[in-house]
Image: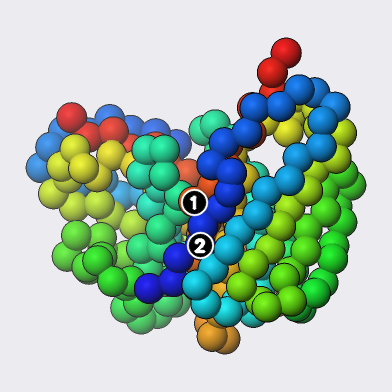
Amino acid sequence: SAVISQKPSRDICQRGTSLTIQCQVDSQVTMMFWYRQQPGQSLTLIATANQGSEATYESGFVIDKFPISRPNLTFSTLTVSNMSPEDSSIYLCSLAPGQIKDTQYFGPGTRLTVL
Amino acid sequence: GQQLNQSPQSMFIQEGEDVSMNCTSSSIFNTWLWYKQDPGEGPVLLIALYKAGELTSNGRLTAQFGITRKDSFLNISASIPSDVGIYFCAGQSGGNEKLTFGTGTRLTIIP
């Protein structure tokens, strides 16, 4: 399966600032996604990162708060904007390689703490 | 929206014991996936199920896709210390790639 890396692996940020998280895959993939995992909770899909077009956001998530870019088939970024302590979570990117039906693989995650 | 309920929420077992956990949904899924997440890591795919009734094994792990397409279970035989972690089920429906995750089962092995 593809190797997925995320940067940074963790960060501590001040309220009101923004953080951009990068997700890099070592091969071209069709579908990439961004998830949030709040402390002690399960994973919730934020959006589907579409290559060359605007991301598709899930209910409860908006572009102004979580802008996403996907300039090519191997790279995507998620920005957490105007952060508050409630944004403290693990943010994970995932990919669906397309060759294997409906399978998704996850990156190592970015652990964000907002003070 | 769709919800996936996993049970039990947590398990405390001794090394060598067998483990069973399940996942139930209020709606039908076309695919069931089981993941394991270690602290500080992303979820790792364990088993994927694509057909109702399908029974699939991966080493000591066995998972089944329920006939009703609204449930799935995961069994772990002869547990070992590295089995400790959080297990998540995830379902996919409707022909798109989006996954809905279960609430998770935390497995702890008592020395």
Q: Is residue A42 left or right of residue A108?
A: left
Q: Who's the residue at 36% across and 81% down the image?
A: A53
Direction top: furthest residue: B111
Chain for mark 2? B
Residue A22 point in image, percent of width and height: 41, 51
- Tell me where residue A98 sits by quadrant: bottom right
Whether labels 1 and 2 belong to a single chain: the reply is yes
Q: Which residue is mark 2?
A: B4
Out of B92 and B17, give the one closest to the viewer: B17
Direction bottom: furthest residue: B95
Type of amino acid under label 1: Thr
Number of residues whose C-alpha sits closer than 10 Å to that of mark 1, classed few (under 14), some (14–19) or many (20 or more): many
Q: Quadrant of the N terminus of chain B?
A: bottom left
Type of amino acid under label 2: Leu
How many numbered marks does the figure carry? 2
Tell whether label 2 touches label 1 (CB within 8 Å). Answer: yes
Direction left: furthest residue: A16
SS of the residue under disc 1: loop
Q: Which residue is mark 1?
A: B103
Q: Who's the residue at 19% across and 60% down the image?
A: A65
Q: Who's the residue at 36% across and 44% down the image?
A: A38
- Tell me where residue A78 sits by quadrant: bottom left
Chain for mark 1? B
Residue A39 point in image, percent of width and height: 37, 38
Number of residues whose C-alpha sits closer than 10 Å to that of mark 2, classed few (under 14), some (14–19) or many (20 or more): many
Q: Quadrant of the C terminus of chain B?
A: top right
Q: Is residue B16 left or right of residue A81?
A: right
SS of the residue under disc 2: strand
- Measure how far apart labels 1 and 2 are at the Cα level: 7 Å
- Tell me where residue B81 sits by quadrant: top right
